[in-house]
Image (spheres, rainbow, N blue to C red):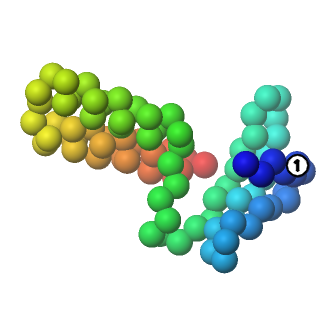
Amino acid sequence: MLILKRRQGQAIDVGEDVRIILQEIRGGHAKIAIVAPKQVRVRRTESARSVTEANKQAAAAGLRSGVVSQVARVDKLLLKVEQEAE
């Protein structure tokens, strides 16, 4: 794990085509911007965990895979709305 200190407006480059920019620091929260190609999946950890948990629960309950894919689609739409709102 690499730990870096950044100030507002500074950026971190990851590889050749991903850039993380620290846009704002307010209270205990940091607002970041991520510039990456469309094929690079960027998700909040808690979103990924919620989809994984929904998949586990669905498998345990014996639900069809269609329900699980619907949950994943809803989570993807919520993430898109959050990104557009910023």
- Identify the residue at the far top of this view: 61
Q: Which residue is painted at 19% across and 24% down in the image?
A: 60
Relative placement, left or right, of 52 versus 7 is: left
Residue 1 in percent (x, y) is at 73, 48
Q: Quadrant of residue 65?
A: top left
* Residue under pointer 1: 5
- Image location (x, y in percent) of residue 72: 30, 43
Please determine whether, in this image, residue 27 is positioned above or below residue 21.
Answer: above
In this orientation, which residue lies closer to the viewer: 62 or 36?
A: 62
Q: Is residue 24 above or below residue 39?
A: above
Say whether residue 30 is left or right of residue 37.
right
Q: Is residue 8 visible?
A: no
The 10 Å Cα crowd at callout 1, few under 14, some 14 to 19, many 20 or more, is few
Near-viewer residue (56 or 74): 56
Residue 84 visible, this orientation: yes
State the residue in front, 46 or 85: 46
Q: Residue at image x 77%, y 62%? A: 12
Name the residue at 16% across, 36% down.
Answer: 67
Q: Position of residue 4 (x, y in %)?
A: 84, 51
